[in-house]
Image (cartoon, rainbow, N blue to C red):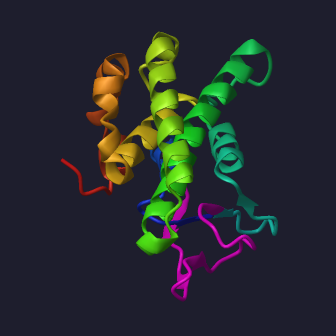
């Protein structure tokens, strides 16, 4: 199998952490960009990463939660097959992805020519980032302090927030999350997949 990757993508990073944590036989390859528009060449018709080419199976998987669930299912699953624990984990995974999406969308608004900036939508994304981080601070005691289907998305989103939206200062907004996050920074899967130039 091959995972098409971009090192800075928090969505691809989730998949790589699962691959490493479970020691799965998946080759990680950089997706080639098709020109300046950032369209990623490969088996995903949406032109995005991550994308999982499953080799002999001619049905590639795209959309990171789907890929994460598939990879997780291959060995010692973190995600419960049914019941409330499954929905809680998926909810937490979605919170992490929602944070990363807000950061991503803000980034693409502010890198455009300043004459094209839309202050209201920039503030909308900033508000979403702050709100999610504050919400996480209220519920972080319910999130596992080791890798899980929920925690992997939250950790990747927080690091992406540092990289692309450091003006938010999420650690000051969410001291409980900040303490929780520290437990992951020493893990080998965290360190080997961390690709951001931040302090």
Q: Is residue 46 magenta?
A: yes
Q: Is residue 185 at all visible to an observer of this figure?
A: yes
Q: In which quarter of the image is residue 195?
A: bottom left
Mostly what secondary structure, the magenta segment?
Answer: loop
Residue drawn 45% across and 28% down? 133
Residue drawn 59% across and 64% down? 49
Above or below residue 69? Residue 8 is below
Specify start and end residues of the magenta stretch as a single range: 23-51
- Left or right for 63, reference 99: right
Residue drawn 31% across and 44% down? 167
Q: Is residue 24 at all visible to an observer of this figure?
A: no
Residue drawn 73% across and 22% down? 87
Q: Position of residue 103 (x, y in %)?
A: 48, 49
- Left or right for 67, reference 177: right
Q: Quadrant of the N terminus?
A: bottom right
- Left or right for 195, reference 157: left
Q: Position of residue 29 (x, y in %)?
A: 50, 70
Depth check: 119 or 28 in front? Answer: 119
Q: Does the magenta stretch include residue 1?
A: no
Point out the residue furthest to the left here. Answer: 199
Above or below residue 175? Residue 121 is below
């Amino acid at each position: 199998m091959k995972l098409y990757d971009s090192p800075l993508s928090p969505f691809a990073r989730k998949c790589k952490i699962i691959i490493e944590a479970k020691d799965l036989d998946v080759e990680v390859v950089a997706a080639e960009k098709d020109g300046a528009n950032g369209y990623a060449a490969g088996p995903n018709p949406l032109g995005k990463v991550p994308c999982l080419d499953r080799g002999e199976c001619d049905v590639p998987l795209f959309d990171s939660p789907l890929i994460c669930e598939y990879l997780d299912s291959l060995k010692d699953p973190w995600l419960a097959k049914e019941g409330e624990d499954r929905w809680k984990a998926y909810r937490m995974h979605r919170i992490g992805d929602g944070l990363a999406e807000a950061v991503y969308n803000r980034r693409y608004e502010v890198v455009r020519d300043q004459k094209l900036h839309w202050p209201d939508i920039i503030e909308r994304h900033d508000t979403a980032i702050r709100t999610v981080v504050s919400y996480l601070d209220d519920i972080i005691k319910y999130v596992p302090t080791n890798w899980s289907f929920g925690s992997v998305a939250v950790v990747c989103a927080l690091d992406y927030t540092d990289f692309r939206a450091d003006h938010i200062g999420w650690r000051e907004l969410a001291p409980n999350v900040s303490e929780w996050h520290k437990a992951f920074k020493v893990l080998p899967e965290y360190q080997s997949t961390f690709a951001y130039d931040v302090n």
